[in-house]
Image (cartoon, rainbow, N blue to C red):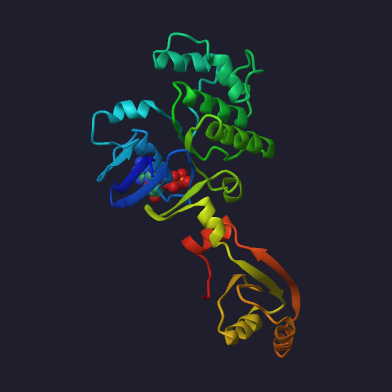
Amino acid sequence: MDYILKAENLTKIYGHHKALDNFSIHIPQGSIYGLVGKNGAGKTTLLRIICGLQEATFGDYSLYGISSRKHEILNARKEMGAVIETPAIYLDMSATGNLKEQYRVLGLRSFDTIPQLLKLVGLEDTGRKKAKNFSLGMRQRLGIAIALVGNPRFLVLDEPINGLDPQGIIEMRQLLLNLNQQYGITILVSSHILDELSRLATHYGFIDNGKMIKEISADDLENSFRKSIRIEVTDGKALAAVLKQTGQPYKMPAPNVAEIYHRLNISQLTSALDKYHCDLLSIQEQEENLESYYVDLIGGVSHE
Ligand SMILES: Nc1ncnc2c1ncn2[C@@H]1O[C@H](COP(=O)(O)OP(=O)(O)OP(=O)(O)O)[C@@H](O)[C@H]1O
């Protein structure tokens, strides 16, 4: 498989703290790769390193097969655009003004493609309006337009939907899918918003404490989702006691709620609970999702 970005043993140490610890990652060409991890897991550190904003303490990585130890990595980075933390935009300038600045920085002489770029990110009607009067979503999309100057084949986005309103989230989703599907741009996107990420990502990497815990394609992930039955009762302890007797795996995501993964005889369960004076409040079939997978992988209460 062709990887846009590959690392096997990246380590970044701040003082005594390992922000990345022998970290590995494999981003297939053409993917939308969702990087998932809690606050402080090391996501931004990784993104800053691959964008050349920081150096790794140990280890290297390759971009389009070019090792970060080689001088040519500087050229490889020109084929990559990024928005890390807040987009780097001039608030007193219009969208066009901001793009012109970036064209100049990259030494591009003609501004002819600016209208096309503005249309692509949905900012074609902003005229002379200054970026300081843009909504957060418009600023994020302007940041992406700036990152797209120079036609990168790899786009790196740090939490692009954080703080956006529902409309902003939908527009961002459509933009990212369009960039990936119509323009073939590989996208690395970090996000906490798992439900939204699951509508976009073709691959996932789960990072915790600076380590890559698991990489998986969206297809493999979906195939691994199990169906379960969610039961809510008046007395979780009684439910746990009854379920323990079955010897089958179950989880208790909340005090009075259990999820079980095997066939269940409801009348037997009800009469067993009855002995503890415990009532069955609700019973529901459900399928695992990205969020429950993440909780299982990175931490949660399980009785398997
Ligand atoms: N410049 C720095 N000096 C010291 N420690 C740092 C520095 N930058 C990051 N860290 C620490 O490294 C760890 C990883 O931080 P990082 O910003 O990469 O996490 P993150 O996954 O991006 O989290 P968040 O989602 O909160 O941005 C954290 O414990 C953080 O406090």
Eyeballing the image, is 96 above or below 174?
above
Q: Is residue 204 visible?
A: yes
Quarter of the rendering containing residue 238: bottom right
| Depth order, front residue of 198/303 | 198
In the rendering, at what x and y percent does residue 88 appear? 48, 26
Q: Residue at x 29, y 38 (%)?
A: 55
Residue that protrudes farthest toward the top in the picture: 109
Eyeballing the image, is 200 above or below 178?
below
Quarter of the rendering containing residue 29: top left
Residue that protrudes farthest toward the bottom in the picture: 275
Residue that protrudes farthest toward the front in the picture: 1
Say which quadrant the N terminus sits in: top left
Q: Residue at x 70, y 88 (%)?
A: 272
Number of numbered labels in the structure image: 0
| Depth order, front residue of 28/255 | 28
Eyeballing the image, is 213 above or below 302?
above
In the rendering, at what x and y percent does residue 25 appear? 37, 48
Q: Is residue 50 left or right of residue 285?
A: left
Q: Residue at x 32, y 45 (%)?
A: 7
Q: Residue at x 28, y 52 (%)?
A: 16
